[in-house]
Image (cartoon, rainbow, N blue to C red):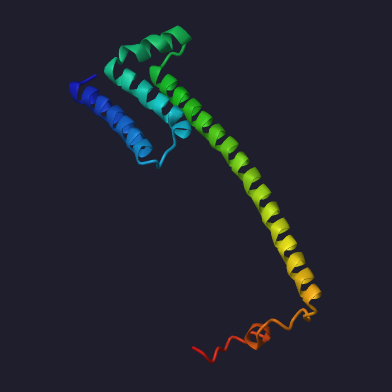
Amino acid sequence: MTPMTYAFGIAAALLALVAIIELMRRATLRERHAVWWLVGGVLALIVAIFPQTLTWAAQLLGIAVPTNLVFFIAIGLLFLVSLQYGAELTRVEDKIRTLAEQSAFHELRLAELEQSARDSLGTPSGADESPADTAPDDGSDASR
């Protein structure tokens, strides 16, 4: 490994970690979503500073080419990130569905209350609407 490659690896790993931390600091990326990215960044920094650890880990796991271990770890981290986002998406979809159901219930309840108020006052259901509200919209608006 040349000194230039060594320095580039360290700089790239540090840049990735700084970017992740900056996104967390600006609240663009939440901590729970940044965990796997931080793990990947720290692993990249360790391998950049101590490249022999990659060779050692590859030999320990019986992998002939250390670069294959890098790809395997990267794919594994991306899988975990994807799995985490899938779980979060499922939770958010459930919350949105619940909120939509509650909103529909409240709109129905409000319409029922308005109708019962009209009935108790003896007002016909369309009497309180202005002529502009009941006129069909033909696309031409004279007030424009």
Q: Is residue 91 above or below residue 63?
A: below
State the residue lying farthest toward the front.
121
Quarter holding the N terminus? top left
Q: Residue at x 37, y 15 (%)?
A: 54
Residue 95, percent from left and from top: 63, 45
Residue 15, percent from left and from top: 28, 32
> Does residue 18 appear to the left or right of 122 in the view shown?
left
3 or 133: nearer the viewer: 133
143 or 91: nearer the viewer: 143
Residue 142, percent from left and from top: 54, 92
Q: Is residue 1 above or below residue 97?
A: above
Count of number-bearing discs: 0
Q: Quadrant of residue 126?
A: bottom right
Residue 49, percent from left and from top: 27, 18
Q: Residue at x 32, y 22 (%)?
A: 45
> Does residue 84 appear to the left or right of 14 in the view shown?
right
> Does residue 25 appear to the left or right of 113 in the view shown?
left
Q: Is residue 50 above or below residue 111?
A: above
> Does residue 135 appear to the left or right of 40 in the view shown?
right
129 or 46: nearer the viewer: 129
